[in-house]
C-alpha cells in the first residue's frame, strides 16, 4: 500500500511536472512565435510599403494618362452630344425641306398636267437653251397662242436665223401625261405600259408636227423642223421604249432634240455666225482697203502733178534769170557807163539749182516726167 501510494504520488508529481513543463514550453513557444510573427509582420509591412510605393510609382503615369483619357473622353462625349444635337436639327430641317419639296413637286406635277402650263414651261426651257447657246441675237420667238400667219398657218415657237439669209424652224412639245403616270406608278408592269404610252405620244406629236410643214412658210428654210423636248428624261425615256423614233421622225421631216442636242446644234449655228461675221469683216476690210488705195493713188497723183508744176516754175524762173543776166543787166550797165547816176547797184541773178523730189514708189516710177528746158537767151 505504501508502494502504491508512493507510485501514485510519483505519478502525480510527474504529471504536474509534465504539465508545468508543457505549459512552460507552450508559453515559450507562443512567446517565440509571437516574436517571430511580430518580426515577420513588421518586415512584411515594410516590404508591403516598399512594394506599394513601387507600384504607386509605376501606376502614377498610368493613372495620369487614364485621367487625361477620361478628360478627353468627356470632351469627346460632350462634342458628340453637341454634334448629334446639330445633326438632329439638320435632319429635321432636311425632313421639313423634303416635305416642302414633296409638296412643291406635287403642285408642279399637278400644274404640268394642264396643257397651257406645259406649253408655257416648254417655251421657257426653249428660251433658256437659246440663252445658254448664246443665240438670242439670231432667234425669233413666238408666243404660243392662237395667232396665225396670213396663210392661216400657226407660227412655230422659234425661228433660228442661219447665215446666208436662211432659217431653221423649232417647235417645243411637252407630252407629259403618260410619263408622269409612269413616275407615279408603283407597279413595274404599269410603269412600263405608261412609258410605252409616252413614246407613242412623242411619235404622235412628231407626226402632227410633220404634217404642219412649217418650213413651207419660209422661203429659205430646209424641209425639216426641230421638235424640242424640254427635258433629257423625256427624251431618253421615249428612245428607250422606241429606239427607231429618231429614224421615223426624219422620215417625217422632224428632228427630235433634247436640251443637250439642241444646245449643240445652236452652238454650231453660232459658230457659223461667227465665221459669217469674220468673212463680212474681211470683205469690209478689203473694200475699205480698195477705197483707201484709190484715194492714196489720187493723192499721190496730185503730189506728182504738184512736183511737175514746181519743176516747170523753176524752169521758167531760171529762164527769166538767164534773160535778166544776158540782156537786161548788160543794157543797164551801159547806161551806168554813159553817166547815169544811181546809188543802187544791180543785184546778181542766180538760177535755182534745187528741184522738187519725184515720187519713188513703183506705182509712179513709170510716170512721164517733163525734161528741164532751161535755155540761156
Image (tube, rainbow, N blue to C red):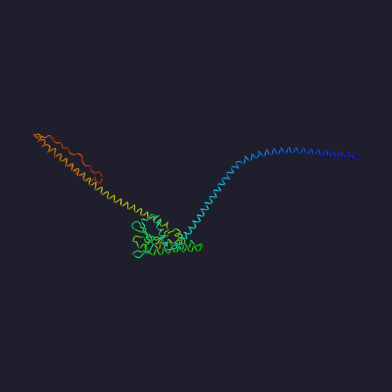
Front one among 171 and 367: 171
Q: Nearer the viewer, residue 258 or 72?
A: 72
Image quarter where the N terminus lies is: top right
**x and y percentages locating residue 26 in the rendered image:** 78, 39
Q: Position of residue 44 (x, y in %)?
A: 69, 39
Q: Relative to residue 70, is residue 206 drawn left or right?
A: left
Q: Is residue 294 above or below residue 349?
A: below
- Given residues 54 and 239, the one toward you in this image is 54
Looking at the image, residue 168 sits to the left or right of residue 24; the answer is left
289 is higher (above) or lower (below) than 332? below
**Direction from residue 208 to residue 14 in the image, left or right:** right
Residue positioned most to the left = 338
Residue 25: percent from left, percent from top: 79, 38
Where on the picture, by quarter, is residue 313?
A: top left
Query: Where in the figure is residue 70, as x and y percent of width and height?
Result: 58, 45
Res 339 → quadrant: top left
Task: Locate the C terminus by quadrant.
Answer: top left
Whether residue 287 sits left or right of residue 211 in the image: it is left
The answer to whether 142 is drawn above or below residue 302 in the figure is below
Counting every numbered tag in the picture gives: 0
- Identity of the residue furthest to the right in this view: 1
Amino acid at each position: 500500500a505504501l508502494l502504491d501510494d508512493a507510485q501514485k504520488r510519483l505519478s502525480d508529481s510527474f504529471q504536474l511536472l509534465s504539465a508545468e513543463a508543457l505549459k512552460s514550453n507552450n508559453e515559450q513557444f507562443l512567446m517565440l512565435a509571437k516574436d517571430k510573427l511580430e518580426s515577420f509582420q513588421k518586415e512584411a509591412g515594410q516590404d508591403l510599403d516598399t512594394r506599394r510605393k513601387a507600384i504607386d510609382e509605376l501606376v502614377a503615369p498610368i493613372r495620369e494618362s487614364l485621367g487625361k483619357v477620361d478628360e478627353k473622353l468627356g470632351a469627346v462625349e460632350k462634342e458628340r452630344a453637341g454634334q448629334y444635337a446639330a445633326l438632329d436639327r439638320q435632319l429635321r430641317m432636311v425632313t421639313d425641306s423634303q416635305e416642302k419639296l414633296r409638296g412643291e413637286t406635287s403642285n408642279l406635277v399637278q400644274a404640268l398636267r394642264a396643257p397651257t402650263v406645259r406649253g408655257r414651261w416648254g417655251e421657257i426651257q426653249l428660251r433658256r437653251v437659246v440663252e445658254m447657246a448664246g443665240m438670242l441675237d439670231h432667234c425669233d420667238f413666238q408666243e404660243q397662242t392662237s395667232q396665225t400667219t396670213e396663210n392661216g398657218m400657226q407660227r412655230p415657237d422659234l425661228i433660228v436665223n442661219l447665215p446666208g439669209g436662211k432659217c431653221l424652224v423649232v417647235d417645243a412639245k411637252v407630252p407629259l401625261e403618260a410619263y408622269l403616270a409612269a413616275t407615279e406608278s408603283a407597279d413595274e408592269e404599269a410603269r412600263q405600259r405608261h412609258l410605252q404610252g409616252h413614246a407613242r405620244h412623242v411619235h404622235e406629236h412628231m407626226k402632227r408636227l410633220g404634217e404642219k410643214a412649217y418650213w413651207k412658210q419660209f422661203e429659205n428654210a430646209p424641209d425639216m423642223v426641230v421638235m424640242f423636248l424640254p427635258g433629257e428624261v423625256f427624251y431618253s425615256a421615249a428612245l428607250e421604249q422606241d429606239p427607231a423614233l429618231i429614224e421615223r421622225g426624219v422620215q417625217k421631216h422632224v428632228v427630235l432634240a433634247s436640251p443637250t442636242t439642241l444646245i449643240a446644234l445652236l452652238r454650231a449655228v453660232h459658230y457659223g455666225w461667227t465665221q459669217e461675221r469674220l468673212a463680212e469683216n474681211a470683205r469690209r476690210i478689203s473694200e475699205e482697203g480698195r477705197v483707201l488705195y484709190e484715194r492714196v493713188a489720187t493723192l499721190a497723183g496730185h503730189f506728182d502733178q504738184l512736183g511737175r508744176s514746181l519743176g516747170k516754175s523753176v524752169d521758167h524762173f531760171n529762164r527769166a534769170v538767164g534773160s535778166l543776166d544776158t540782156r537786161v543787166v548788160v543794157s543797164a550797165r551801159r547806161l551806168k557807163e554813159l553817166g547815169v547816176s544811181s546809188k543802187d547797184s544791180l543785184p546778181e541773178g542766180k538760177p535755182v539749182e534745187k528741184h522738187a523730189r519725184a515720187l519713188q514708189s513703183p506705182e509712179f516710177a513709170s510716170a512721164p516726167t517733163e525734161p528741164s528746158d532751161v535755155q540761156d537767151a
